[in-house]
Image (cartoon, rainbow, N blue to C red):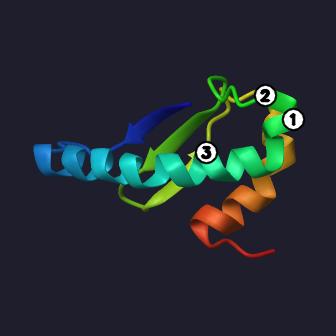
Amino acid sequence: MKFKYILSPGNNKKEKKVCIDMEYELRPKITKFLLNRLESDCEGDFSKFYFDIHFKGKQIKISSKTPLKYRKKIEKDFESEFNGVCC
């Protein structure tokens, strides 16, 4: 799985450090989320999953680089689990 940070213009070292810390916090949670929903589909290989971390808005989104068949299966649950978006 890969993360892309979307930082504010003129970002600084402090923002980058916060992003790295955020990734260390998110990676195990996202891995567990994916295992619970897609383990049989992916056989534990999540290398095709990409996530965009919007630093300013403090949101994480499934990137369009992630195969559509997987995005469709997890999109709604992912939003509510990681961004607090409700139906």
For mark 2, give the secondary structure.
Answer: loop
Residue at mark 1: 40
Determine whether, in the image, residue 35 is placed left or right of residue 26. right
For mark 3, give the secondary structure.
Answer: helix
Residue at mark 3: 31
Determine whether, in the image, residue 18 is placed left or right of residue 58. left
* 54 or 39: nearer the viewer: 39
The quarter in which the C terminus is drawn is bottom right
* 24 or 73: nearer the viewer: 24
Marks 1,2: beta carbons within 8 A: yes
Which of the 4 quarters of the picture holds residue 77? bottom right
How many residues crowd mark 2 within 10 Å: few (<14), some (14–19), many (20+)?
A: few
For mark 1, give the secondary structure.
Answer: helix
Identify the residue shown where x is 25% and y is 43%: 9
Residue 24 placement (x, y as % from top left): 37, 48
Residue 25 placement (x, y as % from top left): 41, 55
Q: Amino acid at mark 1?
A: Ser
Identify the residue shown where x is 74% and y is 76%: 86
Residue 78 placement (x, y as % from top left): 70, 57
Q: Which mark is residue 43?
A: 2
The quarter in which the N terminus is drawn is top right
Kindly report the distance in space between the C-alpha atoms of the residues bearing marks 3 and 1. Answer: 14 Å
Residue 81 placement (x, y as % from top left): 66, 66
